[in-house]
Amino acid sequence: MTKEVIIWLTIAVYIVFMGVIGFVTSKKNKNMGDFTVGGRNAGAWMSAFSYGTAYFSAVMFIGYAGGTGWKYGLWGVLPGVGNAIIGSLFAWLILAKRTRKVTREKGITSMPQLFEKTFQSRSMKLFSAIVIFVFLMPYSASVYKGLTSVCSVLLGISEMTCMIIIAIVSAVIVVAGGYVAALRADFVQGAVMLVGVGALIVAVFNSDNVGGFAEGFKNIADKTSELNLTAFDHIGLWATVMMTSLGTWGLPQMIHKYYGIRDDKEVSRGTVISTFFAFVVAGGGYLIGSLSHLFFDEIPVGGSDFIVPNMLNDSGIADVLVGLVLVLLIAASVSTLSSITITAASTLTMDIVRDRFLKDKEKDISFLTKIVCVIFVACSFLIAWKGTGTPILDMMSYSWGIISGSFLAPYAVSLYWKNANSKGAWAGMIGGFAVALPPLVAKLINSDLTLGGFGKLSDMGAHFACLSMVVSFILVILVSAMTQKCDKLQKGEK
């Protein structure tokens, strides 16, 4: 068989298998709760793999691994380590049990509902629902962009064909089966990702460009020293580490994974599994990207999004492994899209439409949510197709920065501090949102605007994302403390 036939057969087997999972699971969805949180009965392996596959997609493998590897050399592996320790281990240790407990006790199925019931504010619920739906869309579109670059290089197919494939697969899984289908698909896709990344690491290091593990590390260390990284470069690197690690703590599609875990014992087991998964997948992905200077003297045509695809193409890996790589990237991307789609669509329908127009009509809202899922997939597809050429790394940083900058502090502080109030939460949300916005505004209005030695403002999404999270935490705590003290004084309390 030819290379193309082998690759397409591998992809076809994957698509059929995912379709079967979606069809079988669809019969088990009886209400909106089943569709969004799967009856809150998920085990450790499924929850951890679902968390990991929602975390890592073609955005990480293609956009971030290539971009950070090219810019920082061997230092580019740090985001992968940070993703495992901060984004997985610490996130599960600090957030999972408390989030599971709160959402179960109060019957919460979305982040906007968490804010409404915690701070007794319907307007906060409306604001958060709108921000989530709008700003998850560019992140979803960046997933498409990641796949189109790798498929165009390895398969030579059009971007349109690639995007249609992923749109159909993700829509079938989500609409047919909802949360449980996504969980089961994520488990299979997580296994594919672990095997695929391991095989990729071996194949890339054994390529002629690298020459083995010992020689490869020595050569890339030499290349890294030649980059002469400045203090501004290291600040940018650590901004990327923190945004892609701590930033996940405030993303609704990641927090959503804690809602459906069966019990605290499964949380503890899930913490270990999730951390191991992140070390292998994220660590391996960024490690591959860090070798980019051993393959090229300058960025390939098309920009940083084409670094890793061309690396894989030049590595001389076997046809079957090429098929596995593409399945790996499609699996990772479909998992991420499924999580994003369920989160965005259910947020819009439950927290805006049902809250105002369809109260207590469970059947109506379930059907409407599936329709909105299709609309969300279609809109993301159109944004990616009609994209303005924005690199994956920038598009994702705008989305993550605005959402995490707005919601991480109010959410995390409320889990541990009972004195956090609605005034503090509003201050944190608006402050974080405003601080994270400038890079996106600069991109839309004047992409050449610079900020001293840091370079273009439009390229500083990670910097402002980190700043927004810090500002939001400060505002939530200070404003809550000050307003509480003022309320006590008005009531004549000491």
Image (spheres, grey):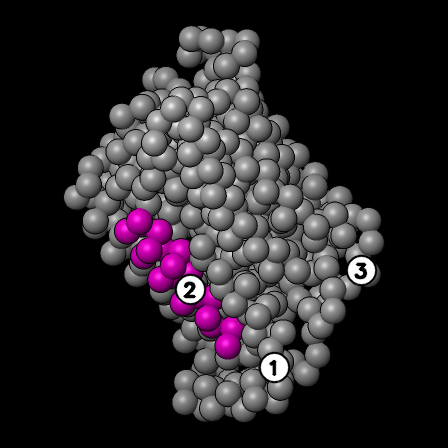
**Mark 1: amino acid:** Leu
Alpha-carbon neighbours of circle 3 within 10 Å: few (<14), some, or many (≥20)? some
What residue is shown at x 78% (from left), y 48% (from top)?
Answer: 444
Alpha-carbon span between mark 2 and mark 1: 20 Å
Which numbered tag is attached to residue 449?
3
Q: Quadrant of the C terminus?
A: top left
Alpha-carbon span between mark 2 and mark 3: 30 Å
Q: Is residue 185 visible?
A: no
What residue is shown at x 63% (from left), y 48% (from top)?
Answer: 435
What residue is shown at x 32% (from left), y 23% (from top)?
Answer: 107
Which numbered tag is attached to residue 82?
2
Which numbered tag is attached to residue 229?
1
Q: Main secondary structure of the magenta part?
A: helix
Mark 3 element type? loop
Whether pointer 2 and pointer 1 mark residues with C-beta atoms closer than 8 Å, the reply is no
- Compared to residue 483, the image places residue 282 above or below, namely below
Q: Which corner quadrant of the image does residue 266 belong to?
A: top left
Alpha-carbon neighbours of circle 1 within 10 Å: few (<14), some, or many (≥20)? some
Q: Earlier in the sequence, mark 2 or mark 3?
A: 2
Q: Which residues are magenta?
A: 75-94
Alpha-carbon span between mark 3 and mark 1: 22 Å
Q: Position of residue 259 (x, y in %)?
A: 33, 34
- Compared to residue 345, the image places residue 451 above or below, namely below
Q: Position of residue 234 (x, y in %)?
A: 56, 74
**Mark 2: amino acid:** Gly
- Compared to residue 252, the image places residue 54 above or below, namely below
Residue 134 among magenta residues: no
Alpha-carbon neighbours of circle 2 within 10 Å: few (<14), some, or many (≥20)? many
Q: Earlier in the sequence, mark 3 or mark 1?
A: 1
